[in-house]
């Protein structure tokens, strides 16, 4: 009886997390669309809507390889010249980052040196404090803006109810290995964000490209993840969050499975620390919609690894009781065999092809327990990664 309950409980949790929650969002999104009139152009992210002054804040550590391109492509955006500034906060960089930014000829570019090195969140605090724009745009140094990204990101702020607008970070095209699968993961996240946005909240913004009203910004603690906390703060301030997929950036993918695993471990540890502090505030404010989305989109996904283990063990115990359990065990064995083959292929330097899907899924699932251990040990402090790696944002 215990094994049966464990099997179906784990199966239900996994099914809800990856299938049920997206379907619920889609149904609720359709219902909300029918219940309200057609949106104004600024709701659709029209680049021709009113354009508030923007301050683009980039926290940088040893980004000499890409910071000039980041600045130039930002200034090349179709946005009023007087309504745009770029603030680069160098977090104790030891390469040529400071000199590249400091020598830039455009007066709209400002360099702030944070010394000694203190981490990303304190760097963002410095940039926000120095900003002059009505809207703050947070982005990664190695994430290059797509056409009209800033205009589309800024357009929804014509609605005074909007406090945060998230774009989406895309990965540059790669070969068909585990790194390329991350693009599929991004598409899945975009689907969830679109559904959540239709209901006025997002379980996280995309750290590569999102905008926040400056009046909402409060100084971040060193271990607080900005792209997870800012939607919560917007919600507590009675603002709504929007998602604008046409406001995108493009950045390099991770270099392999090991780096992707470490990134997700950091995400889980930092996310758990943040939810422990801020979920009670949302509950006290009776922001039940936001609580539901954070638990469904974030917390339950982080339990996926243990749920998979429970499902496998229960399947082994129950395999002779019914054909359903036998089939479930066979399916899991085949899936994990493919994931193992993907790991072996990557170690051998070969292309993974379709093996990338089970391999990448298992990496993300395994990151949940590892991130929990890191969280329990009090190691949720944000860790800085230069542009040569992958931006450490919630995903």
Image: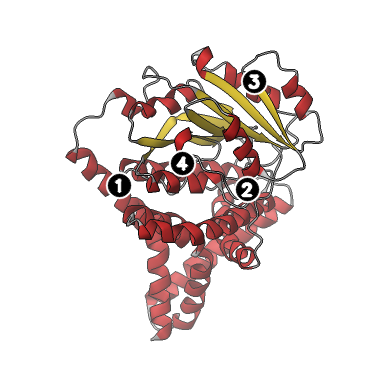
- Relative placement, left or right, of 123 versus 287 is right
Visible residue check, residue 175? no
Label located before the other in sequence (2 or 3): 3
Which element type, helix, strand or loop, lies under badge 1? helix
Q: Which mark is nearer the camera, 4 or 2? A: 4
Q: Which mark is nearer the camera, 3 or 1? A: 3
Mark 1 crowd level (few <14, some 14–19, many ≥20, 10 Å Cα): some
Q: Nearer the viewer, residue 318 or 186?
A: 186
Q: Which mark is nearer the camera, 2 or 1? A: 1
- Relative placement, left or right, of 75 versus 190 is right
Label located before the other in sequence (3 or 4): 3
Mark 4 crowd level (few <14, some 14–19, many ≥20, 10 Å Cα): some
CB under 8 Å between discs 3 and 1 = no
**What residue do we see at 48% from left, 42% from top?**
205
Distance between mark 2 and mark 3 Cα atoms: 42 Å
Distance between mark 4 and mark 2 Cα atoms: 20 Å
Name the residue that disc number 2 marks: 352
Q: Which mark is nearer the camera, 2 or 3? A: 3
Kindly identify which numbered label has been placed on residue 109: 3
Name the residue that disc number 4 marks: 187
Which element type, helix, strand or loop, lies under badge 4? helix
Q: Quadrant of the N terminus?
A: bottom left
Q: Is residue 346 above or below residue 277?
A: above
Q: Position of residue 41 (x, y in %)?
A: 30, 23
Kindly identify which numbered label has been placed on residue 364: none
């Amino acid at each position: 009886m215990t094994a049966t309950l464990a099997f179906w409980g784990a199966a239900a949790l996994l099914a809800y997390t990856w299938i049920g929650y997206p379907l619920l969002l889609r149904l609720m999104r359709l219902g909300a669309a029918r219940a309200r009139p057609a949106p104004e152009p600024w709701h659709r992210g029209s680049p021709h809507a009113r354009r508030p002054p923007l301050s683009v804040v980039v926290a940088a550590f040893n980004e000499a390889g890409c910071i000039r391109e980041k600045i130039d492509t930002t200034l090349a955006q179709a946005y009023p010249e007087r309504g745009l500034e770029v603030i680069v906060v160098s977090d104790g960089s030891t390469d040529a980052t400071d000199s590249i930014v400091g020598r830039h000829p455009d007066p709209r570019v400002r360099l702030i040196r944070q010394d000694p090195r203190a981490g990303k969140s304190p760097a963002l605090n410095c940039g926000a404090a120095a900003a002059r724009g009505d809207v703050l745009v947070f982005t990664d140094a190695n994430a290059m803006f797509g056409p009209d990204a800033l205009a589309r990101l800024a357009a929804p702020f014509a609605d005074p109810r909007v406090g945060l607008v998230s774009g989406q970070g895309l990965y540059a095209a790669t070969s068909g290995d585990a790194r390329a699968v991350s693009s599929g993961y991004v598409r899945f996240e975009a689907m969830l964000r679109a559904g959540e946005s239709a209901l006025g909240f997002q379980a996280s913004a995309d750290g590569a490209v999102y905008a926040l009203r400056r009046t909402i910004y409060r100084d971040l603690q060193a271990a607080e993840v900005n792209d997870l906390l800012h939607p919560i703060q917007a919600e507590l301030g009675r603002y709504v969050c929007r998602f604008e997929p046409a406001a995108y950036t493009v950045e390099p993918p991770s270099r392999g499975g090991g780096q992707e695993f470490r990134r997700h471990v950091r995400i889980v540890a930092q996310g758990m620390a943040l939810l422990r502090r801020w979920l009670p505030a949302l509950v006290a404010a009776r922001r039940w919609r936001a609580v539901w989305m954070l638990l469904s989109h974030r917390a339950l996904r982080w339990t996926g690894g243990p749920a998979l283990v429970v499902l496998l063990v229960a399947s082994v115990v129950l395999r002779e009781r019914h054909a359903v359990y036998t089939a479930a065990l066979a399916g899991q064995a085949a899936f994990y065999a493919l994931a193992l083959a993907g790991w072996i292929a990557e170690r051998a330097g070969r292309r993974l092809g379709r093996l990338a899907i089970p391999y990448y899924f298992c990496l993300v699932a395994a990151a949940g327990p590892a991130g929990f251990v890191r969280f329990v040990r009090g190691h949720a402090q944000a860790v800085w990664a230069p542009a040569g790696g992958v931006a450490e944002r919630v995903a």
